[in-house]
Amino acid sequence: MTPATSPDFPEHAECKTLMYEANQGGGDTPGLEDYLRALQKRKWLVLAVTALGLLLAFAYTNQRTDTYEAVAKVRVAPSPVGAVDARLVQPNLETEREVLDSLPTANTVIRDLGLTTPPNDLLRELTVQFRPDSDVLTAAFKDESPARAEELVNAFIKAYVDDRNAQATDFYESQLQGFADAQTLPAEELQTINSQIADFDAEIGRIASLPGDDPERTRLGELNSQRADLRQQANALRNQIRVEEQGAADVRREQASRTLPAAILQNADTPQHPIGLGATTLLLGGLVGGLIAGILGAFILDRLDTSARDEGDIELAAGASVLGSIPMFGFGSRSGAAALVMLSSGKSAGLQRARESFRRLRTSVLYLSAMNGTKSVIITSAQPGEGKSVNAANLAIALAQGGTKVALVSADMRRPTIEGLFGVRNTHGLSVALDGQGNSDVPLISVGVENLAIIPAGPMPERPGELLGSATFESLIQRLEDMYDFVIVDTPPVLAAADAGAAAAAVDGVILLVDTARTDTSTLLKVRSDLDRAGANVLGTVLNRDRSSPTGRFRSRYDYSYEKAAAGIAS
């Protein structure tokens, strides 16, 4: 949206004043001369810290040993082992992980490869992981030799697969042996009875050949009856043997038709690059980090007063203008859906002031978008509990209500909050899409606000910061910028995790939330330092829980009149 079409366009003049006049030579606001004077006074400190950063990076680069990591994958399927009926036993991946990462498996690898390494030493370098929604175990082995890392991880997964499949084979063989044992006694009895029947047949044939008046012929009836009884017993034994043979045939057919309990999905390749950053990157990082640390150290020592009392102090510490000021909501509007004051129907003066504050912040953000082409921003804070997620959600709603198409990305995968505010389930979202092993589709969820869609954080991944610093996340932001007018990304606090810095490269800039009740100047300096090192473009700050507005009987009656009018319109 351009300023000409924004309903809040007349407020842009006020926004421009906020953005530029604060740094035009206030009494306590340092100018360029102050910065140069601080650097000149402590130039040796800057040089020493820069040299120290480079020296530390050089020392670390020379003393570290390159380590390579080879990765292989195993698919685990249901197994008949332990089954009490015809059903297969579903694998417990945590149990299977422990089996793969166990002393028996390590001993098998040592035996197969003819190693002399203690098994515990091998297990220390082996890592086995899995995703709860998959049937794949991922094994990784670290070693100074890339070829040895590949050989050992492949040996581990082979030993595990062979052992699991051998257990299934033993299970089927045990069943077949049971059926074979069950046939042994009936077969022996049948052989004995067949021999007796043959004897009866011979005796009956002999007597039948005697003359008709021979007294022995009277035994024919009794002999035929006894032979019939024996044949009936023989038939029963044959049926029993056929039942056991059928059971064995069913086991063989079942064994042939079922998938192996374990299979190698991916053998490891020889790793080509060591783990971690390269030597050049480390040296450059040490140089730049030392230079930044030296400059910041010189400035901090020059500015002994670290208290943040007004907007000028905050702008100086954060290095960016104040875009807006959000007042306290009140105790009833700090969590859950009640925190979405832009959707609230409340008519209290506090809620009216809060809504108008977000509309003014919307105007400042739209001005930035019009002037700088900004389409995507991160909203973060210094520490947890400062209200970044609540402010991000309300700003997104305010933009959407003004006609701007907004995508709100819940990228705080460590402690997602956006989902709770909008009542959205967090079963599938950003983490699954960025992980690369599952469904890459990103859910854009409508929350009943026109022009607004959110992307949930999804289940917490193992390394959220790496996902946010990936090319996949950057590509996602670019796609959202093509689909929407504005993209807002909610990340973890800067001082609590490195995620915000990792994600900063993918967006146009960062808006830093400053809690006037908790954040001081020294904290803001640290936040800005972290963001600078991450290459973030800090667009401005937002004062949250601002208590500077007059309240009670000292407030102007014009404030009351506007609030009453706004409350009447809302009703």
Image (cartoon, helix red, strand yellow):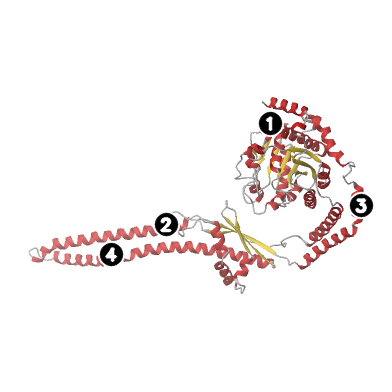
Point out the tag, 2 or 1, that comes first from the N-terminus: 2
**Which residue position is annotated with label 4?**
190
When the figure is inspected, residue 403 is found, relative to residue 474, above or below; the finding is: above
State if disc 1 and disc 2 touch (CB < 8 Å).
no
Which of the 4 image quarters holds residue 292?
Answer: bottom right
Which of the 4 image quarters holds residue 195?
Answer: bottom left
Distance between the alpha carbons at the discs numbered 1 and 4: 97 Å
Image coords of residue 266 (percent x, y): 61, 58
Distance between the alpha carbons at the discs numbered 2 and 3: 82 Å
Quarter containing the N terminus: top right
Marks 2, 4: nearer the viewer: 2
State if disc 4 and disc 1 touch (CB < 8 Å).
no
Point out the tag, 3 or 4, that comes first from the N-terminus: 3
**Which residue position is annotated with label 2?**
84
Image coords of residue 193 (percent x, y): 25, 65
How packed mark 2 is, by other alpha carbons closer than 10 Å (few <14, some 14-19, many 20 or more), is: few
How packed mark 4 is, by other alpha carbons closer than 10 Å (few <14, some 14-19, many 20 or more), is: many
